[in-house]
Image (spheres, grey):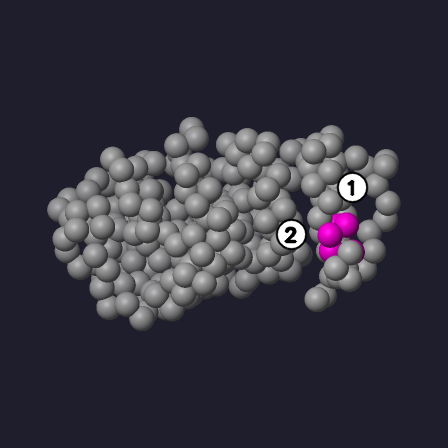
Amino acid sequence: MTHPRTSPATPGADTAADPLTDHAAATRTDHATGTGPRPAAGPSDPAPGTTSPGTTSPGTTPPGTTTLAAATPAELRDHVTAGLDDPARGWLRRALDEAAAHPGTHGPISVWELRIAEAGRRCGPEHADAARVLILHAARADAEALSRVYYQGTGAERRAVLYALPHLVPGPEGLPLVEDALRTNDTRLLTAAVGPYAARHLDAHQWRHAVLKCLFTGVPVDAVADLDRRAEGDTELARMLTDYAAERTAAGRTVPADLHRVLTLTDPPATPSAPAADHG
């Protein structure tokens, strides 16, 4: 099934869709069929993994994991239900039961897709990403279903799809979604895109550019899954990092400490100490 690429490629367009679209749009059309209003989600929510290294957004990252993509469904459910009040906990339980009972598409849009759209309003911004990921798991969404949700969804819904990819799509079929996210300058979407699925399936050229994109947009490299292993001995990545550092220096700008951290991983013995971090 071919899905229209409705995800905006320009930074401004993507930012406009998230966080405002969730509550500003009254309805959204099911673009796969051209029919049926789709209820908008609640207020957008901050993405896990976008905080400074060593910190996390409260209520978003389960204990013992680094991102939603690394958590098992059981870990997510335990963490989320512990933080929800009774009405939200009951809503999530019903949403997961519905998704498990009716995983396919029924009519213009499946019931679990409607619940994904409601998650921000029902569970609150701190838990909405995790709730959406849990619903995708319960629905056993395949690559086709995930693509539909991604391309028709808000920025928050796209993030959930990216976080769910490692567990739901064993092969490279989800790569177009990662590639789409990497074309934006939405730091929350980029954070979700460089998780375990990208580490597993992006080729060397794409992965290097994803690392550079993180440095360029200010996404902490802590968000890049499997960074140490993939950067080790990568002389081409070292060249790209060195060129980028030279460009910043020539422009009178300081070089991000994260750049030197990654450069050290490519060839630890040959890499000089990092200068002060870029605060500009």
Q: Residues within 10 Å of mark 2 (few under 14, many from 20)?
A: many
Q: Which residue is drawn at 82% across and 51% down?
A: 274
Of all residues, the one furthest to the front in this rendering is 250
- In the rendered image, the quadrant that contains the N terminus is top left
Mark 1 neighbour class, 10 Å CA radius: few under 14, some 14 to 19, many 20 or more: many
Q: Earlier in the sequence, mark 2 or mark 1?
A: 2
The amino acid beneath tag 1 is Thr
Can see residue 89?
no
The dot on residue 215 is 2
Q: Give the range drawn in magenta.
A: 245-249
Please tell me whether residue 58 belongs to the stretch shown in magenta: no
Above or below: residue 50 compared with residue 197: below
Question: Which residue sits at x=65%, y=40%?
Answer: 227
Q: How far apart are marks 2 and 1 (CA)?
A: 15 Å
Q: Which residue is drawn at 28% across and 42% down?
A: 3
- Which x, y percent locates residue 27? 22, 64
Nearest the viewer among 169 and 261 is 261
The answer to which image quadrant residue 126 occupies is bottom left
Q: Is residue 70 left or right of residue 150?
A: right
* Residue at image location 39% in from the left, 54% down from the top: 8
Tell me if 27 is positioned left or right of 195 in this view: left
Q: Which quadrant holds the C terminus?
A: bottom right
Instruction: From the top left corner, tell me how far across and down residue 196 is, in percent.
Output: 53, 39
Amino acid identity at mark 2: Leu
Q: Residue 264 carries which label?
A: 1
> Picture coordinates of residue 93 (x, y %)?
30, 54
| Residue 218 picture quarter | bottom right
Closer to the camera, 35 or 200?
35
- Asked whether the viewer can see residue 137, the reply is yes
Quadrant for residue 17, please give it.
Answer: bottom left
